[in-house]
Structure formats: structure tokens, C-alpha cells
Image: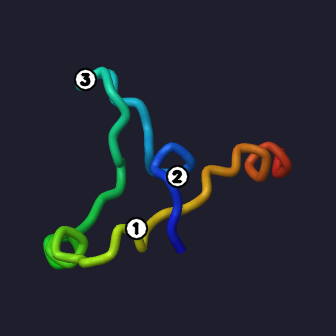
Amino acid sequence: MSGKCENCNFYVYDEYYEDYVCDLYLDEDELVRFMNRKSDSCPYWKLDDEYKSAARQ
């Protein structure tokens, strides 16, 4: 699965950096695999579906 960062659940605004950042926490092994991948698609991309969370309320 791949997608644009702007639509990703992990893409959040960071007030410290005053910019949007990927807020995905990876351990050391996952980070090495992520940085060395040859594909442009992100294996951790997850759709930010705000309507799905509102439906549970």
C-alpha cells in the first residue's frame, strides 16, 4: 500500500518544528530497512480516515 504523505494518518503538524512531519515510531531495524528501500512507496502508509473515527462516537 502506498499513498501521499498528506493523506497519511502518521503525517501530523509539529509545533516545535512548525511544519508537518511523519510521526511514525520505528525501531532501529525498521528504520534501517525504511531508509534503504528502493521503492518510493511507503510500506507504513495508512489512510487518515477522520470519518471512520467519528462513526464510532
Mark 1 and mark 2 in contact (Cβ < 8 Å)?
Answer: yes
Quadrant, the N terminus: bottom right
Q: Which mark is residue 8?
A: 2
Which of these two is toward me, 42 or 25?
42
14 left or right of 55?
A: left
Which of these two is toward me, 27 or 9?
9
> Dot 2: within a 10 Å radius of its alpha carbon, few (fewer than 14), some, or many (20 or more) residues?
some
Separation (CA) of disc 3 from disc 2? 20 Å
Tell me the residue at 53%/51% (across/down). 9
Give the colour scheme of this rendering. Answer: rainbow
Name the residue beneath numbered marker 3.
16
Tell me the residue at 35%/48% (across/down). 22
Quadrant, the C terminus: top right
33 left or right of 56?
A: left
Q: Secondary structure at mark 1?
A: loop
Amino acid at pointer 3: Tyr
Q: Position of residue 51 (x, y in %)?
A: 78, 46
Which of these two is toward me, 45 or 29?
45
Name the residue beneath numbered marker 1.
42
Circle nearer the N terminus (1, 3): 3
Circle nearer the N terminus (2, 1): 2
